[in-house]
Image (spheres, grey):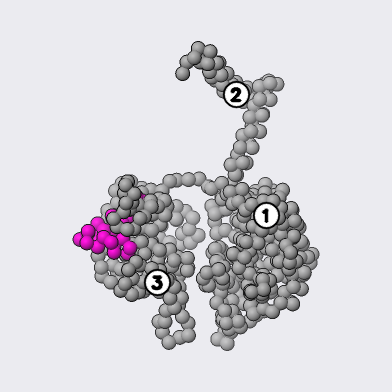
């Protein structure tokens, strides 16, 4: 029987709460060590992490099932398993007697599986007294240097590092027996921003041309939050009606706070019977709902940032330019009219107007589908590489801040990052930006060569440019000679 992964409701005590987590089923039933491991980490790790663990363990168990008679040592079995993550299991003849038919995984994917299984097998060794399949061994000089670099980087950017023991500890001299190959080093991705010149057309003719005015207003509000305040689409879907108000310092503008779905403070000073005042308790007691980041499937809306602006557990929305806040407020009043005429059983500000799900919280899948439809109305296709995607608006916001020469500390605050490094992908110049700068510099060099200059640096640059031109002319002449003589 092949190993399969399913979701199960797990009862661990006499309370009414049921844990719904992914598990593995084999011909012997539920893989209990994995279940116990997931339950032990449930309060500190996310549902996404649980799914990744189950996926990695499923690969290992599947490999063990078909190779259990080939290895007498668990360490050798794990080493063979790890190598096949990189090589796959299919031979050059296209056959695979094991029946696994694995294709070679990318280096990053293979390393991710190995690291996940490292923690899981450590748990098995500690809790079930089984032999370590990937133990710590004495690190060689190369691994020690890498360990030190990793330790130094963590301490350099650790907010509480000044109160910790910053001495290089013994683990610098230890490394895993099986590490996998090193992944490629790379710079900051060329994440494309949504083109600024397209936003007005997309907003008016794309989103604004939806057949249902209620849907148009809802999606326009979300787009304003993404493009004018740099929010992720998931953050916008956590918005409650009570989180929007007029800015007391400028009544024509909007003040918005996005609260953490669990730990954010409940609205209007609410407290539960037992005195709890967080949003998780509010949802449970008032609506009988869990927070959206605890759901699974299409109803789930994740929460990425760990940085909040206030002890009440919210991030402040910062409009740039501030005109976006004024536009949002005008549209918000129309949106409230549509909400008031729709039956709802939740506090979320953005809802579905589809007949089969009328009044239910708006889902990410539905928004992404409507986003693509809005692009199609103006003759465009969704394309992440070209910036035409929901996340492209966040990049547009970040680069707009850079072009306005906003201080990096302020940009970090506006993007709600915990450190300056995090904003690099949003503020780094794109390939197009670099190409444009170099093209302009090339034109400058040409002008210098043509007009001449008394500036020593300019003369030096002109000489370099002339040298490049000389090589180019020589190559052209040589090519002509080869053509005339019939050379190859």
> For mark 1, what is the residue?
376
Q: CA distance from mark 1 to mark 3?
A: 40 Å
For the residues bearing labels 1 and 3, Cβ distance under 8 angstroms: no
Name the residue at the top extreme: 485
- Residue 20 position, x and y percent, is 46, 75
Q: Which residue is at 36% across, 71% downward? A: 25
Crowd rating for badge 2 (residues with CA inside 10 Å; few <14, some 14–19, many 20+): some
- Residue 387 position, x and y percent, is 62, 50
Q: Quadrant of residue 119?
A: bottom left
> For mark 3, what is the residue?
23
Q: Which residues are magenta?
A: 61-87
As rendered, which of 197 and 210 lies closer to the eye?
210
Which is closer to the viewer, label 3 or label 2?
A: 3
Q: Quadrant of residue 367?
A: bottom right
Which is closer to the viewer, label 2 or label 1?
A: 1
Q: CA distance from mark 2 to mark 1?
A: 46 Å
Number of marks:
3
> For mark 2, what is the residue?
465
Q: Secondary structure at mark 1?
A: helix
Question: Most prominent secondary structure in the magenta stretch?
Answer: helix
Q: Is residue 83 magenta?
A: yes
For the residues bearing labels 2 and 1, Cβ distance under 8 angstroms: no
Name the residue at the left extreme: 72
- Residue 461 position, x and y percent, is 60, 25
As rendered, which of 230 and 387 lies closer to the eye?
387
């Amino acid at each position: 029987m092949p190993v399969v992964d399913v979701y199960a409701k797990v009862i661990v005590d006499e309370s009414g709460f049921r844990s719904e987590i992914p598990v593995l089923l084999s011909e012997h039933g539920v893989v209990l060590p994995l279940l116990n491991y997931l339950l032990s980490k449930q309060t500190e790790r996310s549902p996404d992490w649980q799914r990744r663990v189950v996926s990695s363990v499923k690969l290992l168990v599947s490999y063990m099932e078909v190779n259990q008679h080939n290895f007498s040592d668990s360490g050798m079995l794990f080493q063979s398993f790890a190598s096949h993550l990189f090589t796959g299991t299919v031979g050059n003849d296209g056959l695979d007697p094991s029946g696994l038919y694995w294709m070679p995984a990318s280096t990053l994917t293979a390393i991710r599986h190995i690291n996940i299984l490292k923690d899981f097998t450590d748990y098995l060794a500690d809790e079930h007294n089984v032999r370590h399949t990937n133990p710590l061994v004495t690190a060689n000089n190369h691994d020690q240097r890498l360990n030190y670099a990793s330790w130094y980087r963590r301490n350099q950017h650790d907010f509480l590092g000044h109160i910790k023991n910053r001495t290089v500890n013994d683990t610098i001299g230890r490394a895993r027996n099986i590490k996998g190959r090193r992944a490629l080093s790379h710079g900051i991705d060329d994440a494309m921003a949504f083109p600024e010149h397209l936003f007005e057309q997309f907003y008016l003719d794309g989103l604004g041309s939806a057949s249902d005015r209620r849907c148009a207003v809802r999606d326009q509000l979300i787009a304003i939050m993404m493009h004018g305040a740099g929010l992720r689409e998931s953050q916008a879907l956590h918005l409650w009606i009570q989180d929007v108000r007029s800015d007391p310092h400028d009544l024509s503008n909007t003040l918005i706070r996005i609260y953490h779905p669990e730990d954010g403070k409940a609205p209007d000073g609410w407290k539960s019977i037992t005195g709890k005042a967080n949003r998780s308790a509010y949802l449970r007691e008032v609506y009988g709902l869990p927070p959206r980041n605890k759901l699974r499937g299409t109803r789930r809306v994740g929460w990425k940032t760990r940085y909040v602006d206030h002890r009440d557990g919210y991030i402040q929305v910062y409009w740039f330019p501030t005109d976006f806040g004024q536009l949002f407020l005008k549209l918000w009043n129309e949106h409230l009219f549509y909400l008031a005429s729709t039956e709802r059983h939740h506090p979320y500000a953005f809802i579905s107007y589809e007949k089969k799900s009328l009044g239910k919280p708006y889902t990410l899948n539905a928004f992404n589908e409507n986003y693509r439809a809005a692009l199609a109305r103006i003759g465009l296709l969704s394309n992440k590489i070209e910036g035409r995607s929901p996340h492209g608006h966040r990049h547009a916001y970040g680069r707009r801040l850079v072009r306005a020469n906003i201080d990096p500390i302020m940009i970090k605050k506006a993007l709600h990052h915990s450190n300056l490094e995090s904003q690099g992908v949003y503020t780094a110049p794109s390939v197009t930006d670099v190409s444009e700068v170099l093209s302009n510099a090339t034109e400058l060099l040409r002008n210098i060569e043509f007009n001449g200059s008394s500036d020593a640096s300019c003369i030096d640059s002109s000489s370099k440019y002339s040298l490049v031109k000389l090589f180019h002319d020589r190559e052209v002449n040589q090519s002509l000679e080869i053509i005339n003589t019939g050379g190859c």
